[in-house]
Image (cartoon, rainbow, N blue to C red):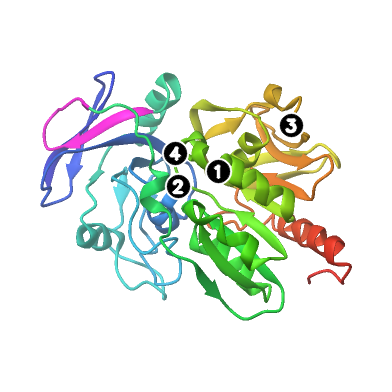
């Protein structure tokens, strides 16, 4: 393999072995993911759109790529940085190796890189732009904007024919959120966030606001319509959807230095005192101090940095979570959040709870 270079915005360089046939250098926001598994989900998660992902676990690719764990139809990342990428896919469900998949999809990657040092650099200097190239080359671009418009759906699609109907507002939704809702026997209509006018006509039993990439304020032109939806139907916000709920009611968001990305983030329920592990992927958080006049209150917090992880509305049937309760990849500790959402719907309908 040829030599390749990862160069951060401040000029720090890391040398490694580059994948073959790089057509040209690439640039993107560099982030790190701390999970031991889940690389397939990360690479195809729309929330990583346009980013260069550093995998901190030293061995990536050992179980290959399968046909079940894609979170979108194609890779969303700009590039991948690893210490070691396994040559052999050692799993009965694997259909190809990680290296072959990245080659086939044209995703540049570096191996034999000290990912611990790269991660330290990101934690010290914060998330920023970086470049991958066959030579040392500082990135020229600034922070990405409007990634959400590159990953949203373009039309309404309805799945299954269950009696109970959920609208999934698509800001760049992961496949696993839809799959989890369908496993509950629900009829789900996926609605791009630019087509919110359709929701009133659909008259769903509840609404889920999905994850998505980038700055939640990129959806500012749609916040008044989103607030109307939230005031009309029981709602659950996930990741970016959680942030959008806060913005719709007049709250604010802010960017973390290096974000939360991994499958082992501890979250505390302030109502019960319970602590559970979660899967997370985000740069932005809701500013708790901005919630005073919104009708929203904090009920979940991140144990490590005390950042806001979950909201409830004082009067309306609204829940939100900064983490991913569908847990792909990650622990299943937070599945109960979906059940709490279904209880809100049940209370509105006066029917028995989902099981």
Q: Is residue 219 above or below residue 355?
A: above
> Which residue is identified by label 3?
294
Q: Residue 83: x and y, percent?
A: 31, 42
Helix, strand or loop under label 1: helix
Q: Are discs 2 and 3 less than 8 Å apart at CB?
A: no
Q: CA distance from mark 2 to mark 4?
A: 7 Å
> Which residue is identified by label 4?
214
Q: Are discs 1 and 2 less than 8 Å apart at CB?
A: yes
Q: Is residue 239 visible?
A: no
Quadrant position of residue 74: bottom left
Q: Does residue 129 belong to the magenta stretch?
A: yes
> Which residue is identified by label 1?
240
Give the foreground label among 4 and 3: 3
Question: In the shown orientation, is residue 344 left or right of residue 338?
Answer: right
Q: Which mark is residue 47?
A: 2
Q: Residue 214: x and y, percent?
A: 44, 38
Q: Which mark is residue 160?
A: none
Q: Please identify the residue farthest to the bottom as the structure is shown.
A: 161
Between 13 and 137, which is closer to the camera in this rendering? Answer: 137
Helix, strand or loop under label 3: loop
Question: In the shown orientation, is residue 65 left or right of residue 107?
Answer: right
């Amino acid at each position: 393999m040829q030599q390749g270079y990862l160069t951060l915005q401040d000029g720090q360089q890391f040398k490694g072995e580059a994948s073959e046939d790089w057509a040209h250098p690439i640039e993107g926001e560099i982030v790190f993911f701390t999970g031991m598994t889940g690389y397939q989900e990360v690479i195809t998660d729309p929330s990583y759109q346009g980013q260069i992902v550093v995998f901190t676990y030293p061995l990536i690719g050992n179980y290959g790529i399968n046909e079940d764990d894609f979170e979108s139809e194609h890779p969303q990342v700009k590039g991948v940085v690893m210490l070691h990428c396994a040559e052999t896919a050692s799993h009965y469900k694997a259909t190809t190796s990680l290296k072959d998949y990245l080659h086939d999809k044209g995703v540049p990657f570096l191996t034999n890189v000290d990912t611990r040092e790269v991660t330290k650099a990101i934690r010290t200097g914060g998330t920023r732009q970086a470049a991958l190239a066959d030579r040392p080359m500082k990135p020229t671009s600034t922070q990405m904007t409007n990634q959400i418009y590159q990953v949203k759906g373009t039309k309404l699609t309805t799945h299954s024919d269950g009696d109970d109907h959920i609208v999934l507002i698509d800001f760049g939704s992961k496949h696993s959120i839809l799959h989890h809702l369908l496993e509950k026997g629900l009829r789900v209509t996926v609605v791009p966030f630019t087509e919110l006018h359709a929701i009133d006509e659909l008259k769903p039993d509840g609404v889920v606001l999905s994850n998505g990439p980038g700055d939640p304020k990129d959806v500012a032109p749609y916040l008044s319509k989103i607030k109307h939806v939230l005031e009309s139907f029981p709602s659950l916000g996930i990741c970016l959807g959680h942030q959008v709920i806060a913005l719709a009611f007049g709250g604010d968001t802010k960017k973390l230095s290096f974000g939360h990305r991994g499958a082992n983030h501890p979250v505390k329920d302030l109502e019960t005192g319970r602590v559970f592990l979660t899967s997370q992927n985000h740069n932005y958080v809701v500013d708790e101090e901005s919630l005073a006049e919104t009708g929203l209150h904090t009920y979940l917090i991140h144990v490590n940095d005390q950042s806001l992880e979950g909201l409830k509305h004082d009067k309306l049937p609204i829940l939100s979570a900064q983490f991913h309760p569908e847990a792909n990849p990650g622990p299943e500790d937070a599945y109960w959040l979906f059940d709490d959402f279904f209880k809100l719907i049940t209370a509105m309908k006066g029917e028995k709870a989902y099981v």
